[in-house]
Amino acid sequence: MGWLLFAAFLYVACAALIVAEVFLPSGGILSVCALACLVGGVTICFRSSTVAGWLGVVVAAVMVPSLLVGAYKVLPKTRFGQRVILARPVRERGDALADGPELAQLLGQIGEVLTPLRPVGTCSIAGRRVECVSESGYIQKDNKVTVIRVEGSQVTVRVLDET
């Protein structure tokens, strides 16, 4: 009976390691340790009896997928999960322009560089934030630019000369 308690402990350790693998970057070391605990638990169950061994295999076959689903689906919705998982960035609706005809209307418009274009960055054109590509390398923030080309979702800008 003592060995079966040790097998149950190995199953619990396996479960804890699987959940920890979701949150801690270990390069797979925690997964290997979880697999070792699982194999050890099943081996101990089979050494006890064949029925206990097959029961251990069934428990493992149900436990591992359930823990993975729980760790990836349910845990982020818990208070603990919300503290350890990064939140998605919040984008204001209507702030950025989508692909298509809206971008084509920007051709020839003048705007201002919001983030440095290295060569890609963000500009404010017609009161909207637009991801732009500079025609010729780096353009510093707060420079005035004009839209010279729109191809699909790529908006190409040229710095305006302040002469």
Image (tube, rainbow, N blue to C red):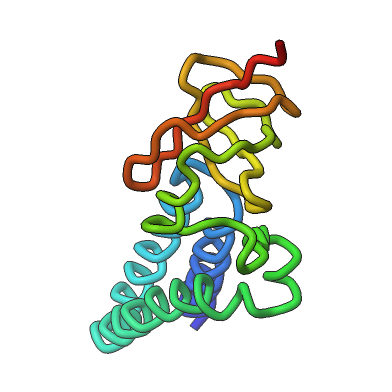
Q: Please name the residue shown 59% across and 26% down the image.
A: 117
In the drawing, does residue 19 fall left or right of residue 79? left
- Left or right: where 79 falls relative to 77: right
Please, which residue is most extreme toward the front here? Answer: 163
Asked if residue 84 is positioned above or below residue 138 in the image, the reply reads: below
Provide residue 162's location: percent of width, then percent of height. Answer: 71, 15
**What residue do we see at 50% from left, 51% from top?**
30
Quadrant in the picture for residue 12:
bottom right
Which sits in the foreground, 143 or 69?
143
- The correct choice, above or below, for 48 with respect to 21 in the image is below
Circle count: 0
Q: Nearer the viewer, residue 16 or 142?
A: 142
x 75%, y 65%: residue: 83
* Residue 36 visible in the displayed image: no
* Residue at point 71%, 10% (across, down): 163
List the single residue furthest toward the top. Answer: 163
Q: Choose between 76 and 161: the one closer to the eye.
A: 161
The percent coordinates of residue 90 (x first, y second) are 67, 63
Q: Is residue 84 visible?
A: yes
Residue 104 x/y as whole percent: 40, 49
- The spot of residue 113 in percent (x, y) is 67, 32
